[in-house]
DNA sequence: CGAGAAATTGAGTCTCTTCAAACCCCGTGG
DNA sequence: CCACGGGGTTTGAAGAGACTCAATTTCTCG
């Protein structure tokens, strides 16, 4: 099954006909090198981008270079359905690793949503899950300690990756997000991220290899994080 | 003009027919006392709520009582179009002051959006502006200093209030948000909020009366905050 | 094997928090 | 008319968590 469908079906039912129509509208694939922008802050794209492989992130840059990552984007995610509705995007989307993407032209979205209201609903829902994630991150940044934040972030990434089969309980999986990225996502400094991760390792909650996403004690990690996956609005139990 | 229309027209054009249909679907008004919930976290409302008067806030509560306010809601705002799309809401909506509200039944939304695609688009757009606001707050909480955060928050509240005519340049206007609320919204402690506000007053950027929203030096405040209103996606120049 | 990126470590500093108390405004009741 | 009380604001002081600076080690890859 196509990752896009895999992801959307975790949010809402889609018929075979809708699935075919949606996949038929995709253009690409395209390649984006690590470090490049998939969409530029302030631009007005004519298409939305679907992640096929790799990791990307939405981010905002402040005038003096401070960066806040707003969300990570994995295969199956539509990075900016956003630009379809708001026209001008107010944040950048960057490739954290080399990415493979597909384009979904805005015209096609209009046609699809007019013909298939259920698809429109699904896309709307998908976009609002992004909101829910942003709000949860806001709680993290505003009210949680470094330890809670990082534990929470790791829990979320794990659940989201497992939705598209890129992570599984008991199996360490590739993790491409650097500590610098984690710092910009969590609102902490790089040094503090590093030291806090050490603590999580010492507690036996996560694995020691920095390139791997390895949960050694899911319940423990959840408890530390105060993580409750319902905000991801997934249909099944992905926790 | 009805505040709801006033607000929506700042985001997108609406025809007279659509306006009439939308207003016709409203039920109420209802009154909500200060401190009560307009919508309860975890519930599945059958209607969305439109603010007619007063101030409300969306918020999340952590297990130990910490609270993060996600957004303030003013007259004209639809507090949870959200519940229409996601069914179960993942945050509470509380009345910061006594509020007057109207209900927009989900069934009516379905009917309206099917008949008037432009209205559907407007509502979708409205909901994504909420996302943009949440993301901006995330940047605040994650990467900005106390001073920048509060200045930014004040700028935003001022612009949003002026959209519906509740604030105007050069005119102090009523401000019902307490410093405790401001603390929970900014992710700072109450004490630090108070001291930082003092600083903003000493710099001559805002007025000294805590019950009033009074901007003494808009450009100065904007500069301190690094505030750029484009994320509010308003049609005109409301800055 | 060398070079650059990422991770790690240590030390000193500062912002923001917490605790605790006082103050002020304002509506209420004696 | 004034004491009373409560919510909101203000202040002070001490402490903690997180930040910055700077150097070192480890990893990755050509």
Image (spheres, coloured by chain):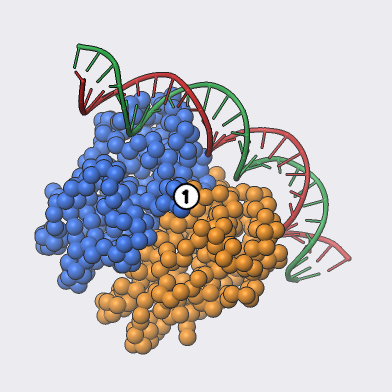
Chain colours: A orange, B blue, C red, D green
Asked whether, in this view, residue A195 is left or right of residue B10, the answer is right
Instruction: Pinpoint residue B222: horizontal percent, then vertical percent.
Output: 41, 38
Q: Quadrant of residue A16?
A: bottom left
Q: Quadrant of residue A64?
A: top right
Quarter of the image containing the C terminus of chain B? top left
Asked whether, in this view, residue B50 is left or right of residue A143, the answer is left
Q: Quadrant of residue B48?
A: bottom left
Asked whether, in this view, residue B206 is left or right of residue A39, the answer is left
Instruction: Pinpoint residue A200: horizontal percent, then vertical percent.
Output: 65, 58
Q: Is residue A129 above or below residue D1?
A: below
Please tell me which residue is depicted at 31% across the width and 62% down the height of the picture.
B43
Q: Secondary structure at mark 1?
A: loop
Asked whether, in this view, residue C1 is left or right of residue B71, the answer is right
Q: What is the crowding at mark 1: few (fewer than 14 residues within 10 Å), some, or many (at least 20)? A: few
Between B231 and B35, the one nearer to me in the picture? B35
Between B140 and A93, the one nearer to me in the picture? B140
Please tell me which residue is depicted at 17% across the width and 70% down the height of the picture.
B111
Whether residue A187 is visible, yes or no, is: yes
**Label 1 lies in what chain?**
B
Whether residue A35 is visible, yes or no, is: no
* Disc 1: which residue: B64
Between D1 and A104, the one nearer to me in the picture? D1
Please tell me which residue is depicted at 62% across the width and 49% down the height of the picture.
A189
Please tell me which residue is depicted at 38% across the width and 81% down the height of the picture.
A22
Between D7 and B187, the one nearer to me in the picture? D7
Q: Is residue D30 above or below residue B35?
A: below
Instruction: Pinpoint residue A138: horizontal percent, then vertical percent.
Output: 46, 52
């Amino acid at each position: 099954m196509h990752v896009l469908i895999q992801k959307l079906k975790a949010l809402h039912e889609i018929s075979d006909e809708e699935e075919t129509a949606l996949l038929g509208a995709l253009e690409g694939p395209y390649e984006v090198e690590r470090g490049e922008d998939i969409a530029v802050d302030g631009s007005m794209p004519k298409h939305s981008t679907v992640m096929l492989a790799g990791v990307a992130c939405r981010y905002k840059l402040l005038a003096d270079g401070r960066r806040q990552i707003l969300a990570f984007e994995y295969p199956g995610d539509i990075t900016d359905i956003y630009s379809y509705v708001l026209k001008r995007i107010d944040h950048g989307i960057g490739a954290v690793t080399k990415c493979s993407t597909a384009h979904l032209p805005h015209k096609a979205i209009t046609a699809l949503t007019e013909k298939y209201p259920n698809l429109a609903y699904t896309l709307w829902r998908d976009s609002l899950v992004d909101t829910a994630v942003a709000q949860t991150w806001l709680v993290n940044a505003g009210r949680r300690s470094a330890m809670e934040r990082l534990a929470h972030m790791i829990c979320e990434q794990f659940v989201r990756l497992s939705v598209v089969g890129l992570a599984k309980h008991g199996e360490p999986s590739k993790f491409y997000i650097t500590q610098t990225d984690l710092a910009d996502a969590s609102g902490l400094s790089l040094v503090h991220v590093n030291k806090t991760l050490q603590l999580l390792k010492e507690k036996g909650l996560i694995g020691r290899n920095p390139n791997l996403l390895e949960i050694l004690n899911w319940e423990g990690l959840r408890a530390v994080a105060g993580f409750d996956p319902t905000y991801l609005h997934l249909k099944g139990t992905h926790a």
